[in-house]
Image (tube, rainbow, N blue to C red):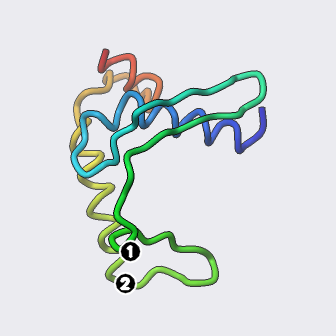
Amino acid sequence: MGELGRLGHTEVRFYSQLAPELTGVPKAYETAFDPWTGRYLLILEDLPAASCVFPDTLHPLSLDQASLIVELLAALHATFWDRLPNDGARAVGVALHTLR
């Protein structure tokens, strides 16, 4: 499975197992991942187009957008702080197993 397959697997695991514990994350109605092909499916709640921004490499983030991302990542990490084993393991799989 290539890089995109691993990305899909991670995204499916995020929306199916971690996102339900977070606020402000779109609700996932269905997720699926095929480890053989790397293909995946995410059915997320509809988001208002006016409040969504999808940056790309041609239009870099502004300082305010980058600051917001750092704040959101800090909130994400704070949600799961001290919920991983203290053996140095940091894989998402360990976090998911711990949360079950």
Q: Quadrant of residue 38?
A: top right
* Residue at x-position 78% and y-position 38%: 2
* Residue at x-position 36% and y-position 58%: 47
Q: CA distance from mark 2 to mark 1?
A: 5 Å
Asked whether residue 91 appears in the rendered view, the answer is no
Q: How many discs appear?
A: 2
Q: Secondary structure at mark 2?
A: helix
Q: Quadrant of residue 8?
A: top right
Count neighbours of disc 2 (C-alpha within 10 A) and say few if under 14, some if 14 to 19, many if 20 or more. Answer: few
Count neighbours of disc 1 (C-alpha within 10 A) and say few if under 14, some if 14 to 19, many if 20 or more. Answer: few
What x and y, as percent, mark residue 71?
26, 63
What x and y, as percent, mark residue 41?
59, 35
* Residue at x-position 63% and y-position 83%: 58
What x and y, as percent, mark residue 90?
43, 32
The residue closer to the viewer here, 24 or 46, is 46
Left or right: 54 in relation to 75 = right
Circles 2 and 1: CB atoms closer than 8 Å: yes
- Figure quadrant of the N terminus: top right
Q: Secondary structure at mark 1?
A: helix
Q: Check disc 2 and report the residue beneath it.
A: 63
* Residue at x-position 32% and y-position 81%: 64
- Figure quadrant of the C terminus: top left
Left or right: 54 in relation to 82 = right
Asked whether residue 48 appears in the rendered view, the answer is yes
Left or right: 99 in relation to 12 = left
Depicted 87 relative to depicted 2: above or below: above
Q: Amino acid at mark 1?
A: Ala
Q: Which mark is residue 66?
A: 1
Left or right: 99 in relation to 94 = left
Q: Which mark is residue 43?
A: none
Q: Amino acid at mark 2?
A: Leu
